[in-house]
Image (cartoon, rainbow, N blue to C red):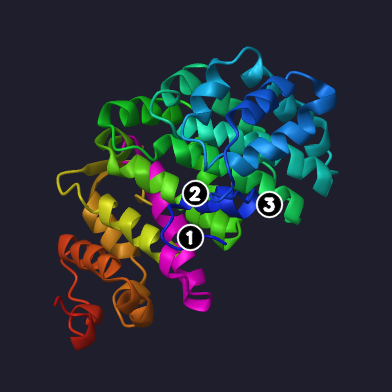
Amino acid sequence: MMDARASPATLAQQAAVPSSTNLAINTDEIMQWIIDLRDPSKREFALLELSKKRDSVPDLPLWLWHSFGTMSALLQEVVAIYPAIMPANLTAAQSNRVCNALALMQCVASHRETRGPFLHAHIPLYLYPFLHTTKVSRSFEYLRLTSLGVIGALVKTDDKEQLLVVINFLLSTEIIPLCLRIMEQGTELSKTVATFILQKILLDDTGLLYICQTYERFSHVAMILGKMVMKLTREPSVRLLKHVVRCYSRLSDNPSLIFSLTLDARVAQGGAGQNVKVRAQQALKQCLPDQLKDLTFKNCLKEDPSTMNWLRQLLTNLEIDGQVLHDEELLPK
């Protein structure tokens, strides 16, 4: 059973690769399974058993990382699946096996002592081909979801120094366009994890400055968030709405940011082009969906007052006096 209070990264892991926290721990048995990962004939069973125990053994990430050949064995499992994703002929059995390996990687990525080495080894880059897939079958969805869970585990840290290292690494890769595509086209859970990753990037000043470095990046993120709001009006999700509103709120946090745009000569009616100054908050105000200003999401906002607080902050930053701010049932207690 999935814990409704769990983070998106944990939910992704639980959905794709269920574990049990109530299983008895036999250290000798676990150590033997780690050794068995080096033996291709025993690896599949060892992956399955270790993935079941991952939430029950706090030191499992350390044992996995520091044991001889273990991370190489997990990478072998990941790389072995590449031929099955292009062309797309991944079977359920293949997906389950590689997802068990990815669950163990997520375990390593989530631990404060192994997160840094895991990142410095550039292991997340091996998962990006899975995030590029678009096939909607369950096998591919679980593959994307578990891969997102690994990235989500990297950004889920309260250590500001570690988080900055993670974000600088991610910004040097293609993670933002990959997340944006999944936010637009994925299932609800995949969208939730991808939006959580974007949110964590935006909450860091380095990530916010990167997104707002050009109008093109800023507007692309705002456009995808707008599409998500429209979809949420038809298929409401309290958890997903929370992350969408939090992203919008963070984008509105930079009142001094001004974009310099050059309009096409035809639009500017002659000349070589016209430079136009656009304030980021004004641009966001113009494209903010009406559904975040009226009572469209009243029921969701009643369920989660923290989301209402972030929405209130967003509308205040943008100087929008929306109907949602005056509903008695949504007023601060």
Tell me the quadrant of the picture where the C terminus can be found.
Answer: bottom left
| C-alpha span from label 3 to label 1 | 20 Å
Element type where label 2 sits in the image: helix
Q: Which residue, given by chain and number where applicable, does mark 2 sit on? A: 10
Q: What residue type is disc 3 on?
A: Glu
Q: Residue at x 62, y 32 (%)?
A: 127
Q: Earlier in the sequence, mark 1 or mark 2?
A: 1
Instruction: Give SS at disc 3.
Output: helix
Q: Is residue 187 visible?
A: yes
Residue 266 visible in the current orientation: no
Q: Position of residue 322 (x, y in %)?
A: 22, 77
User: Is residue 212 rendered magenta in the image?
Assistant: yes
| Disc 1 and disc 2 in contact, CB within 8 angstroms | yes
Residue closest to the eye, 317 or 120:
120
Q: Amino acid at mark 1?
A: Asp
Query: How many numbered badges does the structure rendering display?
Result: 3
Q: Which residue reaches farthest bottom?
A: 328
Quarter holding the N terminus is bottom right
Q: Quadrant of residue 301?
A: bottom left
What mark, if any, has residue 3 been given in the picture? Answer: 1
Between circles 3 and 1, the one closer to the viewer is: 1
Q: Mark 3 = which residue?
A: 141
* Side (left or right) of 123 relative to 225: right
Q: Earlier in the sequence, mark 3 or mark 2?
A: 2
Q: Which residues are magenta?
A: 210-239
Q: Is residue 318 above or below residue 98?
A: below
Q: Nearer the viewer, residue 271 or 286?
A: 286
